């Protein structure tokens, strides 16, 4: 009984100290200067390539212009991407992707025109 009570106290302390977060409570941090972050540029190019595999819309990656990152079960990125459409006109797009660093895997969550 004494061990069970001690265990309940420990669990209560952990829950209070480290509350569970929902996706609405993700903490996003700005990516300082994406021009000087080669990995961020690679992720933007990868996100664009994944989108093109599905949409076949002929857009071409130019660069990531800004973005944010959250640390959730890996790194979750919201990237603002500059690209050219199939007519060569510039456009703005937003990609959300998850990078699982340990497994070296990426998942494209969403990709579309920036509003």
Image: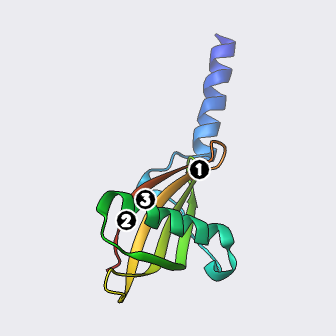
Residue 16, horizontal then vertical, whole percent: 59, 44
Q: CA distance from mark 2 to mark 3?
A: 9 Å
Q: Nearer the viewer, residue 70 or 92?
A: 92
Could you classify mark 2 by the number of other residues whose Cα lies within 10 Å: few (under 14), some (14-19), or many (20 or more)? many
Q: Secondary structure at mark 1?
A: loop
Residue 23, label in figure = none
When the figure is inspected, residue 9 is found, relative to residue 17, above or below; the finding is above
User: Residue at image x 68%, y 74%?
Assistant: 37
Work out whether residue 28 can be spotted. Answer: no
Q: Which of the marked residues, 2 or 3, is nearer the chain's N terminus? A: 3
Tag 3 residue: 50
Could you classify mark 1 by the number of other residues whose Cα lies within 10 Å: few (under 14), some (14-19), or many (20 or more)? some
Q: Which of the marked residues, 2 or 1, is nearer the chain's N terminus? A: 1
User: Residue at image x 37%, y 75%?
Assistant: 59
In this rendering, which labeled residue sits more in front, label 3 or label 1? Answer: 3
Tag 2 residue: 111
* Quadrant of the frame with the N terminus: top right
Q: Nearer the viewer, residue 61 or 113?
A: 61
Tag 1 residue: 74
Question: Given contact means CB atoms under 8 Å apart, are the residues at marks 3 and 1 in contact?
Answer: no
Could you classify mark 3 by the number of other residues whose Cα lies within 10 Å: few (under 14), some (14-19), or many (20 or more)? some
């Amino acid at each position: 009984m004494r061990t069970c009570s001690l265990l309940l106290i420990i669990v209560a302390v952990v829950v209070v100290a480290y509350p569970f977060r929902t996706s609405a409570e993700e903490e996003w941090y700005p990516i300082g200067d994406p021009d000087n972050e080669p990995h961020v540029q690679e992720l933007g190019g990868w996100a664009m390539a994944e989108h093109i595999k599905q949409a076949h819309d002929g857009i071409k990656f130019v660069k990531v212009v800004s973005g944010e990152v959250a640390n959730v079960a890996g790194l979750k990125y919201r990237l603002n991407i500059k690209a050219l459409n199939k007519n060569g006109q510039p456009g703005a797009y937003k990609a959300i992707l998850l990078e699982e660093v340990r497994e070296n895997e990426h998942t494209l969550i969403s990709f579309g025109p920036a509003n």
